[in-house]
Image (cartoon, grey):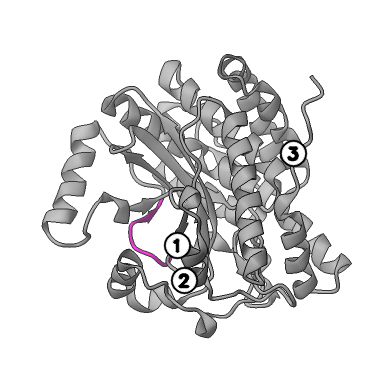
Amino acid sequence: MLLQPRGGALAQSIEAVLEALPDAMRTSVSSETHSAAVELTTGVHDSVGGAVDELGTLREDIASLLHGLDLTAGVAGTHPFAVWDEMVVAPGARHQEVMGSVRALARREPTFALHVHVGLPDPEVAIRVANRMRVHLPLLLALSANSPFWQGRDTGLASARTPLFQAFPRVGIPRAFADFGEWADIVDLLIRTDTMPDATYIWWDVRPQPRFGTIEIRIMDAQSRLDRVGPLVALVQSLARVEATEGLASEKAIHAQEVLDENRFLATRDGVHARFVDPVTAQRIDVAELLSSVIDVCTPHAEDLGCAAELAAVADIAADGADGRQRRLADEHGGLGGLVEALADEFLVAPAADPA
């Protein structure tokens, strides 16, 4: 979020930011649909630690640049008190294309997400893993939920960002695809019939990205603190490896679309306190219990990937949901303006050093 330094309101300043970018930052910093948003993109890394280190450097670099423009930055799934009639769509060609396509839907308040790409060896493995990762999307949303406030009020939700973004077309948990060819046929049909310009206009919670050789997990709220990014990324990477090599999600769960959609809503509403529906046992299961079993399966894979420490820290996130933390900060800092200023203060908080 591009922020005004006093009061914490959104700053519609992306054009000034892009003009001030040094050449070294231009591949990592870009605009988004709204003029008050800036996107930070790391390069490709073979470790979670490397990706988070680069993200930390990017936060430092953009904070320094913004300081020279009398701006600050902060991160949350939504800005707590922005209202739609103050929003400006960014001038870039893609953003204007989105505006022309979805019209008034693009004039809502901006939302902010954490997207994670995981490289996979071939298209068929990618589709298989994407199908299976669908089962884990509600858990990832519950752990990342970081947007309780919207238009100046407490929504009662853990992730107000999720239903806000749901207004866009081609969103949510996609169906399972038989193979890469079936996925490609659907994408090709939508492009050939001029429904969308290209596959990046599919905004599902998980989607293949053939040009990168990845699947992209898109369901998570953006994280205010850097120390919450690494654990979530480690969980995504480890789960993808589990699903690519041995499989964790059951066939019944993979094809229980209605259950997946219901669990997505429960995660939206309750965050780390959600109780999901287990389609296999026909019982409810707490996030903490589900996460414990997932971590047990993922830990050997995390050790192979070099992110075991980050994965272990996911339990700390589950014990203190970011939505509840925002509510505490608002109380401690005298309201939503103080909350945004506190989020800006936390923008550069580095993860604790690994004692090992």
Residue for badge 2: 15
Query: As drawn, which residue projects farthest toward the left?
Result: 192
Rendered location of residue 71, percent (x, y): 65, 70
For the residues labelled 3 and 1, the Cα–Cα distance comes to: 26 Å
Identity of the residue drawn at 72% across and 41% down: 317
Label 1, on which residue?
31
* Tag 3–tag 2 contact (CB < 8 Å): no
Magenta residues (range) = 164-172
Query: Quick check: 225 left or right of 109?
Result: right
Cβ–Cβ under 8 Å for marks 3 and 1 = no
Which tag, 1 or 2, sits closer to the chain's start? Answer: 2
Within 10 Å of the Cα at label 1, are there few (<14), some (14-19), or many (20+) other Cα atoms? many
Q: What element carries label 1?
A: strand
Query: Which residue matches tag 3?
Result: 351
Q: Which residue lies furthest to the right in this view?
A: 332
The quarter of the picture where the N terminus appears is: bottom right
Measured in 3D between alpha carbons, the distance from the residue under mark 1 to the one under mark 2, in whole angstroms, is 8 Å
Front residue of 46 and 67: 67
Q: Is residue 155 magenta?
A: no
Q: How far apart are marks 3 and 2 (CA)?
A: 31 Å
